[in-house]
Image: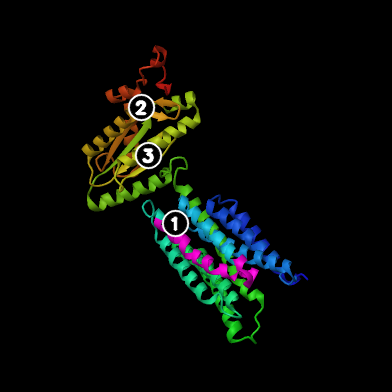
Amino acid sequence: MVDWSKIPDVGAVTLLACAFASVARHNHTPASKLWLTAWAMIAFHFVASMFLPVPGIWGSIALFITLASLTWAGELFMWAAVPYRQQRSSSIMVALLIAVNTLYIGLSIAGPAIGWALAPVAVLFCVCPLIITLFSMSRFNHILRWATVLLRGSLALFLLVVQHRPGDGTNLALNAVLFTVYFGCALHFLYMYRRATAGAFITIAGFVAWSAVFVVAPAIGVLWPQLQIESEVWNLPKYVVAVGMILLLLENQIEHNKYLALHDELTGLPNRRLFQDRLASALERARRSGAQTALLLVDLNRFKQVNDTLGHHAGDLLLQHVAIVFAGRVRRSDTVARTGGDEFSLILEEPTNRAEADRVGQSLLQLLEQPINLGDHVVQVGASIGISIFPEDGLDMESLCIAADRRMYDEKQGGSALNGRAAEPLASASASPEQQSGTGLQTAQ
């Protein structure tokens, strides 16, 4: 017979999974994809649980699928919250844990005929994470790795003690496996989402409650067997976690939108809006302390030629390269922003002066004089730089920007000796005379 009373649970989880998928569609991250796969496993878990009352081998298969899919989902949730997921050893770890969970559940359901195999498999819960952690220590080490070793080692010890107890040994062992998986999820999410938001709190609390189900339910069955609690009560933590994860995705999307509103999407640098806000703050600090602040406007001389000759992809690579070079040249207290198509702006805060600003400007010109490799092409671009100093060249943001822009324009029109050199085409030993008199662009030899 089929337990049709599970239909509402299947429907509720399916609807939540669909809602989750709808939100995750706008959040294309590896974590959201793993979460969605795990929720598909949870839905599969509920479908399989409908067939638990079926007698014989089919009921046993349904029980195996019900428990295995629940542990698979938990391991995926946990792996999604691992900050070092890109490590190869992390993939091996989750694969081995899923395999050991599945094997142990299968042996437990198979019955006492092969009960002798439970002990060595229980030991694997500790041995596998420990071996992976020790072998990868020379290249990588993390506190969550050791938390996993400790948690799975405690599980192995508990299983060796209780799994052969007459009567309730198997039930206690399986509940311990599930508790370990979902308590591990709570620990990983607590580490990954250390922020005071509703989504983080609800998700972590939901995982704690989910893991507690596998302790509280058996305890009630032993201590108060006459107390009957509907299965929907034990399923509530699942829905709490689903709601928390949806909130986490929405919070991440809001943070991402805020970031895009203040940063250039191509280079990751502050955009004009954030640049103006930082410049205003820098000027206010300079007024209070009586210090100087420098503004540098940098315009690439040959950016249009790169775009027209090599295409927009090469132009994007050039802008990204310049952004990295500029960001690596200034102090962390300074600001580099992309304020136009091929225009970059820098704010140099105290301690600074005109001589220091001129020195930084010259070093930026020299960096742009160097050949830049853009995949199959090498380009050489010059730049024009305008510098203004607060309070010498202006007492407010607008006057400083006008002064720097005017000087940059004058330099672009007149051209400095350094800029003249930077504007020369790059020539290699294998370049032809035609290549050496072109646009300053050439294919890498």
Q: Is mark 2 on a helix, strand or loop?
A: loop
429 lies above or below 363: above
Mark 2 → mark 3, Cα distance in angstroms = 15 Å
Q: How many labels does the image show?
A: 3
Q: Residue 132 carries which label?
A: 1
Ranked by sequence position, the earlier of labels 2 and 3 is 3
Q: Is mark 3 on a helix, strand or loop?
A: helix
Ranked by sequence position, the earlier of labels 2 and 1 is 1
Q: Which portion, as a residue range, is magenta? A: 105-134
Q: Where is residue 61 in the image (x, y as percent from the top left)?
A: 69, 65
Q: From the image, tell me which residue sits under label 3.
A: 324
For the residue marked with disc 3, what is the amino acid?
Ile
Q: Residues within 10 Å of mark 1 (few under 14, many from 20)?
A: some
Quick check: is 283 in the magenta stretch? no
For the residue marked with disc 1, what is the amino acid?
Ile
Task: Report the front residue among 297 and 161.
Answer: 161
